[in-house]
Image (tube, rainbow, N blue to C red):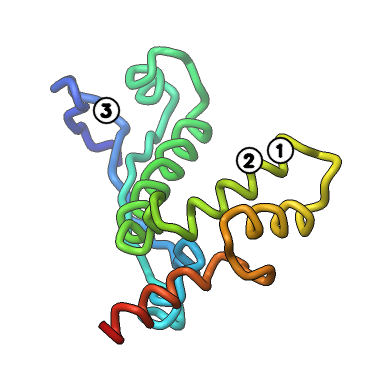
Amino acid sequence: METPTLDGGGVKVVGKRSENDKTVIKSAYDSPKFKTDYPKGLEVPFSFDVYENDAAALQSLQSGELVKLVNARLKSNARSAAIAKATEPYKPDPNSPEQRWARMVDDATKGNPKLTREQIVAQINMLLGLPADYNGEVIAEAEETESAGA
């Protein structure tokens, strides 16, 4: 049964309805805290609009896209938004020492394709005065140790 609903602009769209779904997030930015908090994954619900015919989809998009394409796009957008909202607390700080080190390694790898990643890591660690075997996690552990001792 087609249910008339109001579109974002206040226009009645016949053949549009909302559906609910859920997805399970297994990892959030490789965060160990996320994996500890949700060992079986985090189930995130989301809702999206479904168009039941071409006329409703055409009225919404003004482009003549097929109903399946419109529904897939709406579901994908809703799923992405739900995942982004659920994983926001686990997103790493882009200005943390670990993230800056990782960006330096990535940028140097792109800028000098003749060197291997291991060579680039060794050079960056040497320039920053870090241990040769530093892998992006030592700084946080050292900071935690220093703050605990203070």
Q: Which residue is mark 3?
A: 14
Q: Amino acid at mark 2?
A: Asp
Residue drawn at x 29%, y 84% is 148
Q: Position of residue 76 (x, y in %)?
A: 46, 44
Query: What is the C-alpha distance between the residues marked 1 and 3?
Result: 51 Å
Q: Position of residue 134 (x, y in %)?
A: 62, 69
Question: Which label belongs to residue 110?
Answer: 1
Q: Which of the pair 27/14 is nearer the observer? A: 27
- Asked whether disc 2 touches disc 1, contact meaning CB atoms under 8 Å apart, the reply is yes
Outermost bottom residue: 149
Quarter of the C terminus within the rendering: bottom left
- Is 39 located above or below residue 104 in the figure? below
- Is 120 located above or below residue 44 in the figure? above
Callout 3: few (<14), some (14-19), or many (20+) C-alpha neighbours within 10 Å?
Answer: many
Q: Position of residue 100 (x, y in %)?
A: 49, 51
Query: What is the C-alpha distance between the residues marked 3 and 2?
Result: 51 Å
Residue 83 shows in this picture: no
Left or right: residue 55 versus residue 114 is left
Disc with the residue nearer the chain's start (1 vs 3): 3
Quarter of the N terminus within the rendering: top left
Q: Secondary structure at mark 2?
A: helix
Q: Amino acid at mark 3?
A: Val
Q: Position of residue 118 (x, y in %)?
A: 77, 59
Q: Which residue is mark 2?
A: 107
Q: Which of the pair 32/61 is nearer the observer? A: 32
Disc with the residue nearer the chain's start (3 vs 2): 3
Query: What is the C-alpha distance between the residues marked 2 and 1?
Result: 5 Å
Callout 1: few (<14), some (14-19), or many (20+) C-alpha neighbours within 10 Å?
Answer: few
Q: Amino acid at mark 1?
A: Lys
